[in-house]
Amino acid sequence: MPTRAAAGRSLAGAIVVLALACAGCRNGQPQWDQVSRLQAERTELKLKVEQLQAENEQLARQVEALASLERDVRLDALDTIASIEISRRSGFFDKDRDGTKETLAVYLRVIDEAGDAVKLTGAVEVQLWDLNAPEDQALLAKWNVPPDELTRLWASTIMTSYYRLTFDAADIDLSDRDELTVRATFTDYLTGKVLREQIVLKP
């Protein structure tokens, strides 16, 4: 978007060219096509200058309003996240119907203070644990979902909204495991708040 100074220079240039065009008449007659074009350009530049002035005034008002508020007060107003929730719908699925459950689906809801699911800019880490296994073998897998990917995984139903996260679990041996624990960590990129939740699933 052009700056006010640049738009002003362009406007002044258009006026100069207009004057030169009139001075360079052919056979004493002005070049009306060129004059009309320059007049249109002058009008357009004038409108852009007025638009830039209005935008600058709006930005100045916003800066003034933010400057009058303490940083902690602004963050407290934004900090409406209360918890995260892993839906009981989460679990292992046989996506390609070959008889093997190779996909882990995690339905994650970020809950605000009103109890509603909200869509926020943030990142998610999901860990899969077998807490019955030896300590050095308990962590079976870990996945990270960055903000740009997370925002595309938002889905809604009539009843609620959630992030539907799916992970490839084909390399995880689910046989002879009574239960597995899914742990999710959500980091809110707006306030920096970190929320954690876990759920026990049957393979």
Image: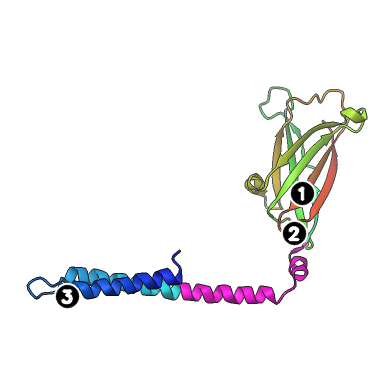
Q: Amino acid at mark 3?
A: Ala
- Which residue type does callout 2 highlight? Thr
Q: Secondary structure at mark 2?
A: loop
Whether the residues at callouts 2 and 1 have beta carbons within 8 Å, the answer is: no
Which residue is located at x 51 percent, y 72 percent? 55
The amino acid type of the residue labelled 1 equals: Phe
In this picture, residue 31 sits left or right of residue 48: left
Tell me the mark number nearer the camera, choosing from 3 and 1: 3
Circle 3 — which element?
helix
Is residue 55 in the magenta section?
yes
Asked if residue 71 is positioned above or below residue 139 in the image, the reply reads below
- Disc number for residue 186: 1
Q: Residue furthest left?
A: 27
Task: Identify the disc placed on residue 191.
Answer: 2
Q: CA distance from mark 2 to mark 3?
A: 63 Å
Residue at the spot 24% in from the left edge and 68% down from the top edge: 37
Precedes in sequence: disc 3 or disc 1 = 3
Mark in front: 2 vs 1 = 2
As rendered, which of 136 and 160 lies closer to the eye? 136
Residue 58: horizontal and vertical position, in percent?
Answer: 55, 75
Q: Is residue 53 left or right of residue 162?
A: left
- Give, as a single range, the part of the protein colored magenta: 52-80
Write down the residue under mark 3.
23
Say if 155 sits above or below 18 in the image: above
State the mark number for residue 25: none
**Which part of the image, by quadrant, shows the C terminus?**
top right
Magenta span has 171? no
